[in-house]
Amino acid sequence: MIDKKLAATMCDYAQKAVSERLCGDGDVIAMRSKGGFVKNAAPFAELTEDKLVEVKADDRSGQNALLGELFATREDINAVMITHPAYVRAVAEAKATIPAVIDDMAQIVGTTCKTSKSAEVADVIKAVKGRNSCLIAGGGALTSGRTMDEAYTCALVLDKAAHVFVCGSVVGGCKVINTLEAKLMRFVYKKKYSKTNQENISQREGD
């Protein structure tokens, strides 16, 4: 049986994604569970607790291959979202890399967000290695976190960064945050500002 708090958390954040216009075809929301992971079996706008399914940890069929591999190989990941806002799709289709064009991105996402070479599982896993997010070639943004709140926040920030990156490119380019400064922002965020907060949120989200 799916944990009630976990189910409520997933439905809540799916609706938040809808309200922020992050959605498109093939959106995914998933959280680690004791037996494997739980994911949506309906579009975000239609998602209710009875439209969530639990997948066994060793199930690698279809879409479960990517989610299963992420949860199996990344102990730091407890939640995953794949969203398809317009500017993210544009960057993913161009197979471009988004640099740290805003402070929020440097802190929450990192110095860059790469687009995978292809949509194949191995290429997506490679693109997200050592990171909490990547863009999927020809698709959307894969964001992850210690909590669903963190994965969702990352999706919001990536949407904002993609918007800045695309619009800035049209008028001559964006001012990119210095790599060293971006790394420092990321380090301070992970080690100081977010650690206790994410631990508290994790207790509220269930399982």
Image (spheres, rainbow, N blue to C red):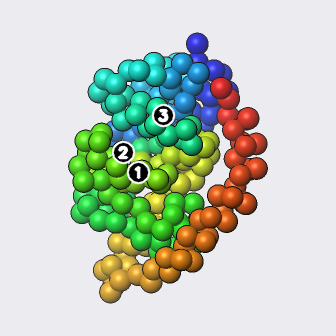
Horizontal and vertical percent position of residue 96: 29, 65
- Bin the neighbour count of mark 3 within 10 Å (Cα to Cα): few under 14, some 14-19, many 20 and up: many
Does residue 24 appear in the picture of this structure? no
Q: Residue furthest top?
A: 1
The quadrant of the rendering that contains the C terminus is top right
Horizontal and vertical percent position of residue 63: 33, 31
Mark 3 residue type: Phe
The local secondary structure at tag 2 comes to helix
Look at the picture and state if 98 lies above or below 26.
Answer: below
In the displayed structure image, the side of residue 135 where residue 73 appears, left or right:
right
Horizontal and vertical percent position of residue 15: 54, 40
Does residue 173 appear in the picture of this structure? yes
Mark 1 residue type: Val
- Marks 2 and 1, how far apart at CA: 5 Å
- What label sits on residue 128 in the rendered view? 1
- What label sits on residue 18 in the rendered view? none
The quadrant of the rendering that contains the N terminus is top right
Residue receiving disc 2: 125
Residue at 40 percent across and 34 percent down: it is: 69
- Bin the neighbour count of mark 2 within 10 Å (Cα to Cα): few under 14, some 14-19, many 20 and up: many
The local secondary structure at tag 1 comes to helix
Mark 2 residue type: Ile
Q: Considering depth in this image, is 173 or 202 the residue closer to the camera?
A: 202
